[in-house]
Image (spheres, rainbow, N blue to C red):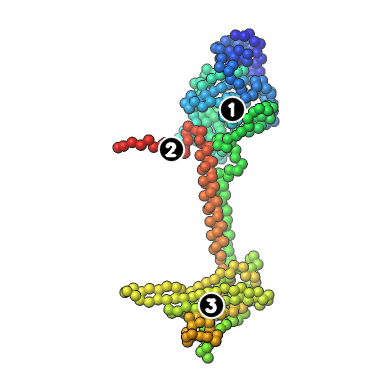
């Protein structure tokens, strides 16, 4: 022993390792005396990332570093360091460093109660915590003061429960701590350490990733989906379809027997909708029998002269072949116009049949009359927008699920209870 006069800052110090020779002592606070325990020469070969007895402001509190321990998890041989800090109120806070990742660990007096039926998880303040790892600790080396019994520390069974941004640590089922991620840059600035490596690992379980979407994101998408559905339902109930125009037409003039090149409907009114414009639907029913007709429509706004043009081909064929009846096509067709301003309108219709363009100078065959009816409906429900929105919400939920799962798999990579781990198949024979 070197007989160095060593300062003691923690009134509850249990062990002390001399900063000069490394010798480990048991400290008796009542007598303020040291009792030699063992050489602890390994401590002299270790170099902590923070100089002993350094001072720092971390998260608004002044701390002094009074001790460092080098530890190993016995089961998995994982190594880390713990830097023991003390504040002006003699409260101990631990900075734990594993592979460049820093955690701030604090003792707590009130702690969660583990349910007896499922001791591997618990809920606290609306958040679930799951058993992340359990282990026993081996003390490899010590420098400075330690406010707990090092010999008893190696007998302690530790359990860690992981939440989204916090971890609860239980020792021997009675002592509890909280552990939170602290950025390496904050440690570097607080202790004024110009050489401290500030790299970080995104996959650390307590590494807060601001780009990661929260767990309740899918629930939020579900609420949005319900609201969109309610809005769609309200439009259906409040905007019952109304018939703005109905009319019957024929491609042949009944008096002359000549084909009609163009037909015009009587004026009809499209009323103002909730958003100003309205969705209208134009339905056509054509009496075609093994024939076809193509109708070119022009919807003309009588106030502005604006036109909307579109075509509707109608064909229907049927027969009997090889003992079976067959049919193809449809006598009915509909077109949706999504944004029609309120006004007075008329329809112009130009038909083309299998006989050619009616009313022209060339008709290859005698025109075959095609009778058809036209119905214009307003306040039509548009399902396409609803389907697009719901599809996007489902896709967003799926994307979030896989993003969250990928991130969660990384969070559990260091756990000895990894729920995503699948043991490799070793092969074998029956």
Which residue is label 3 attached to? 295
Check disc 2 and report its element: helix, strand or loop.
loop
Q: Residue drawn 34% across and 75% down?
A: 321
How many numbered marks does the figure carry? 3
Q: Earlier in the sequence, mark 1 or mark 2?
A: 1
Please identify the quadrant where the N terminus is shown. Answer: top right
Q: Residue at x 44, y 76 (%)?
A: 316
Residue 129 appears in the picture as rendered: no
- Name the residue that disc number 2 marks: 422
| Residue 117, quarter of the rendered image | top left
Q: CA distance from mark 1 to mark 3?
A: 79 Å
Q: Is residue 19 above or below residue 230?
A: above
Secondary-structure class at tag 1: strand
Q: Which residue is mark 1?
A: 96
Which badge, 1 or 3, comes first in the chain's sequence?
1
Q: Which numbered disc, 3 or 2, marks the residue that appears first in the sequence? A: 3
Q: Is residue 398 above or below residue 305?
A: above
């Amino acid at each position: 022993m070197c007989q160095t006069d060593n300062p003691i800052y923690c009134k509850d110090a249990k062990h002390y390792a001399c900063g000069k020779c490394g010798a480990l002592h048991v400290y008796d606070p009542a007598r303020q005396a040291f009792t030699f325990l063992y050489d602890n020469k390994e401590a002299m070969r270790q170099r902590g990332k923070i100089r002993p007895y350094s001072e720092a402001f971390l998260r608004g509190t002044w701390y002094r570093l009074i001790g460092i321990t080098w530890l190993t998890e016995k089961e998995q041989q994982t190594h880390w360091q713990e830097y023991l800090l003390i504040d002006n109120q003699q409260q101990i806070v631990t900075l734990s460093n594993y592979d460049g990742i820093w955690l701030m660990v604090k003792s707590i007096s009130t702690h969660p109660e583990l349910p007896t039926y499922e001791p591997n998880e618990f809920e606290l303040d609306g958040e679930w915590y799951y058993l992340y790892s359990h282990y026993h600790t081996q003390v490899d080396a010590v420098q400075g003061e330690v406010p707990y019994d090092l010999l008893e520390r190696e007998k302690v069974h530790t359990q860690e429960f992981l939440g989204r941004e916090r971890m609860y640590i239980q020792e021997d089922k009675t002592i509890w701590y909280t552990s939170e991620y602290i950025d390496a840059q904050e440690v570097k600035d607080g202790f004024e350490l110009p050489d401290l490596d500030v790299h970080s690992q995104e996959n650390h379980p307590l590494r807060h990733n601001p780009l990661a979407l929260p767990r309740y994101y899918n629930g939020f998408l579900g609420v949005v989906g319900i609201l969109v559905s309610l809005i769609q339902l309200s439009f259906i109930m409040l905007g019952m379809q109304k018939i703005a125009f109905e009319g019957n037409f024929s491609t042949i003039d009944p008096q002359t027997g000549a084909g009609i090149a163009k037909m015009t409907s009587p004026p009809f009114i499209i009323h103002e909708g909730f958003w100003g414009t309205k969705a209208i639907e134009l339905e056509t029913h054509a009496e075609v029998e093994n024939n076809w007709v193509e109708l070119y429509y022009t919807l003309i706004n009588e106030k502005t002269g604006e036109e909307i043009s579109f075509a509707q081909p109608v064909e229907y064929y049927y027969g009997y072949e090889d003992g079976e009846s067959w049919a193809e096509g449809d006598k009915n067709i509909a077109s949706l116009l999504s944004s029609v301003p309120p006004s007075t309108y008329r329809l112009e219709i130009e038909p083309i049949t299998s006989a050619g363009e009616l009313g022209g100078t060339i008709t290859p065959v005698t025109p075959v009359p095609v009778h058809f009816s036209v119905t214009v409906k307003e306040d039509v429900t548009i399902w396409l927008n609803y389907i697009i929105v719901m599809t996007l919400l489902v896709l967003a939920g799926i994307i979030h699920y896989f993003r969250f799962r990928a991130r969660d798999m990384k969070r559990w990579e260091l756990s000895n209870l990894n729920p995503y781990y699948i043991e490799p198949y070793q092969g074998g024979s029956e």
